[in-house]
Image: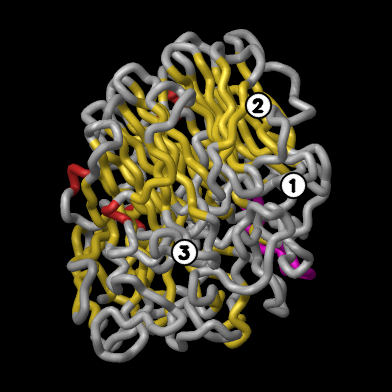
Amino acid sequence: MKKYLLMSLAFGIGSTAFAQGTYTGPSSVTPLKINPAAAKQKAQLQDLVGASNESFETVVNSLGKKTKLAPQSKTFTTAPIGTTEYQNQTNASICNRIVNNSDGTVSATWTFAADPAWADRGTGYNYFDGVSWGASPTVRIESVRTGFTNIGITGTNGEVIVCHEASNIHVSTRPVKGTGTWTEQALGFPDVWSRLSVGGPTGQTLHVISQTTGVGTTPYWGQDGAIAYSRSLDGGLTWDKLRTVIPQIDSSKYLGFGGDSYSIDANGSTIAIVAGGFDVDVVLIKSTDNGNTWTRTVVNDFGIPKFDAATMITDNNGDLVADTIETSDASLNVLLDASNNAHVFYGRMRVVCDVPGTSTGQGLSYFPYTDGLMYWNETMGASAPVMIAGMKDYNGDGLMNIYTDPTNAVLGMGTYQRSLTSFPSSGIDASGKLYLTYSSLFEGINDAGEGYDIAASTLIAPVSAGKSFRHQYVMRSDDNGATWCAPIDITQPDYTNTGFDYHEGVYGAMAKDVNGFVHVIVQDDQSPGHGVSTTTTPDPQSGAANIIYYKIPVADLACGASINEHTSSSDLTIYPNPASNNVSVVLNSTKATTASITVYNMVGQAVAQLEKNIVSGNNTVKLDISSFNTGVYFVSVIVDGNNYSQKLIVK
């Protein structure tokens, strides 16, 4: 049996997907720990995103050298609207934190703290009145310590904010958005990590989901971390459903879900919830009667029902050998369009459990250099989710140039415990165009001044431990998700010289309603990682992060070349793909010459290489791949000084 070709660095995550060690704050999930037996990672990592799903921005000249990238065309505006010392805006999925109101105003929230020890943590709130933003807030809106906030508009003008106290769902409402006193209430049950969406026939129904008491505690209705559903039909005055468990995701189907590993959206009387995680299905549950009854669709099947890493291995084909499973990274997003079709986004992840148990070196492990943002919508039916975005190969060498600590003591990036491309948040306009924002690791200089100097096309040798930055990207689809336009980097690296923007752009939240402009808020600072951790998690922070508002004209996101089309696709074709035994590499050349063909594995090692004399026009070269392990490869072809590449999947 062929085994998946794996990255060599794995993290152990224990029997319940979370292991020993805790964050300082009471409202954070337990961090994952490194698996000492697998703590080796090469400095250069090959991109894991399929070439058909990439938008390479590197220009190749006639000498085959990489030219300096031109600055991106950007006409959007930005504004700092707040700060926070508490930099962990979510443990997985993005909260609904910004609303684009129909009258030209915007309401925005985030988890705020002015105190470096976070004693004053709560909801940071700011409001754009159509002319300008208010002053950066200096205090939370609540009278008690809260976190992980969501905002919605009730009726035509009211405002509601839902978050959690230490162990209680907290609701704040006021009748007029942007002004007035907040009325606070606690719903009276010990849940955390809530999500809010407002819907119903008159826009007064509050749909709230939350995690019951947290993973590793007393089970709720048979689940260790159930997703509870609560509903108010009158804007939060009364609640006719409190802490109910929807049958489609109850203990008969799932052991439980992790913190923040779910997303919700409502459109009139239709509600969609998507949930997932490292060791569980990506599942969509949907109601068309305002939350009374529900249906269930498995978007991505984990393959092992009610998997328990304390007692089971990841054997999804019954041969008693642990398999590496492609799953979600628990950062998910769901959006309902005007036809009430659900669109689902999530970060791609790979996990394995070959030694079950709860001790060190046992349990489920994940591969932190897995990349890829996955997408599915209901019109795709039983088709598998597709990869629509990933880390961008700016220098076009087929590798992700990430420089890590030479001792492999720490990751070469912030420890978010998600895919290299993750944290999706989406929106839609009146014509049905879809918009998406996400964070992705940036192939540039890291916080230690090492990495790949894109402008100079040179490598900077690592001299000390450094972490690469994540940047925030935005893109759109004009055809209901069938293809996606090339993304733009809104963290604004300066491609005109070597003075790159040393900024971490993460946790982008997009307002669902797009009306000529995309509205996004992003957490921005100069330290990779969120720093909300004990000293055992090496992501130190210095000072507060900024909350930046972006107003992006939709014209900035117009499709040139689709992100589903590689720039060299007309010159290089590989079929069949995926394949098991043989593939045909079709080359198009303007003259008779010699082609150099190299196949690389996922860690950048050449596993096959040949020279082939070709003629002008189309040429077909056969490759025998029967000896290759199952996995992802790059086929790189150099013809007359031009370098082309395509992804090859061996099954």
Question: Does the CB distance between marks 3 and 2 fall below 8 Å?
Answer: no
What separation in Å lies between label 3 and label 1 (alpha carbons)?
Answer: 40 Å
Find residue 195 and name its label.
Answer: none
Residue 29 horizontal/vertical position (percent): 60, 59
Q: Is residue 432 visible?
A: yes
Number of numbered labels in the structure image:
3
Residue 462 in the magenta stretch? The answer is yes
Residue 622 horizontal/vertical position (percent): 20, 76
Residue hosting label 3:
219
Label located before the other in sequence (3 or 1):
3
Task: Identify the residue at horizontal 29%, vertical 64% (top origin).
Answer: 253
Q: In the image, which residues are magenta?
A: 453-466
Residue 360 horizontal/vertical position (percent): 60, 85
> From the viewer's perspective, is the residue at label 3 or at label 1 nearer?
3
Secondary structure, mark 1, is loop
Q: Is residue 148 left or right of residue 152?
A: right
Question: Is 112 above or below relative to 154?
Answer: below
Residue hosting label 1:
526
Residue hosting label 2:
125
Question: Does the CB distance between marks 2 and 1 fall below 8 Å?
Answer: no
Question: Is 126 above or below relative to 639?
Answer: above
Give the residue type that dot 1 points to: Gln
Relative depth, front residue between 364 and 144: 144
Label located before the other in sequence (2 or 1):
2
Q: Is residue 640 visible?
A: no
Q: Quadrant of residue 411?
A: bottom right
Question: Does the CB distance between marks 3 and 1 fall below 8 Å?
Answer: no
